[in-house]
Image: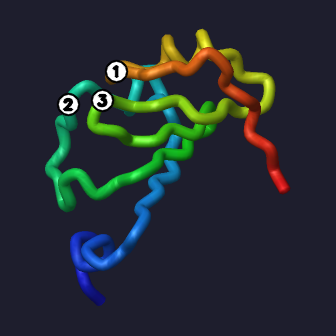
Amino acid sequence: MGGAMDLVASAKKIIVAMMHTDRKGNSKLKVKCTLPLTGVGCVNQIVTDLAVIEITPQGFCLKERASGVEVDQIIRATEGKLIVPDIVPEIQWV
């Protein structure tokens, strides 16, 4: 089996599923990554327990929020630059 970089090298869209914060409530969506990087600039979207966030050159762009989660909660839980549109719909599960 190849490494993570081998897996993302040919993918058209990379989506990361993760918790928005750590056990202490600290944001995992950082201004700058503090962990070793396997693939730089390859993630397109992040899905957390709070929101769906698109990765753009300008920063994290809030696309949808989890049911019952307010935008202010997502803003407080995000350390990195978060672009917030005027309307952020709840995630619609099909």
Relative image position of residue 89 (x, y in whole percent): 73, 29
- Front-lying residue, 17 or 65: 65
Q: Secondary structure at mark 1?
A: loop
Sequence order check, earlier mark of 3 and 1 = 3
The three-letter amino acid code for the residue at tag 2 is Lys
Relative to 38, is 67 on the left or the right?
Answer: right
Q: Which residue is mark 3?
A: 58
Quadrant location, the N terminus: bottom left
Relative to 78, is 10 on the left or the right?
Answer: left
The three-letter amino acid code for the residue at tag 3 is Gln
Sequence order check, earlier mark of 2 and 1 = 2
Q: Counting other residues with Cα less than 10 Å from the Cα at mark 1, is it few (<14), some (14-19), or many (20 or more)?
A: some
Q: Secondary structure at mark 3?
A: loop
Relative image position of residue 4 (x, y in whole percent): 27, 71
Sequence order check, earlier mark of 3 and 2 = 2
Relative to 13, is 50 on the left or the right?
Answer: right
Q: Gap between marks 2 and 1, in whole Å?
A: 10 Å
The three-letter amino acid code for the residue at tag 1 is Lys
Q: Secondary structure at mark 2?
A: loop
Relative image position of residue 56 (x, y in whole percent): 35, 39
Q: Residue at x 30, y 78 (%)?
A: 10
Quadrant location, the C terminus: bottom right
Q: Residue at x 38, y 41 (%)?
A: 55
Q: Counting other residues with Cα less than 10 Å from the Cα at mark 2, is it few (<14), some (14-19), or many (20 or more)?
A: few
Q: Which residue is mark 1?
A: 81
Q: Residue at x 62, y 31 (%)?
A: 50
**Front of the two marks 2 and 1:** 1
Contact check, label 3 and label 1, Cβ < 8 Å: yes
Image mark for residue 32 = 2
Contact check, label 3 and label 2, Cβ < 8 Å: no
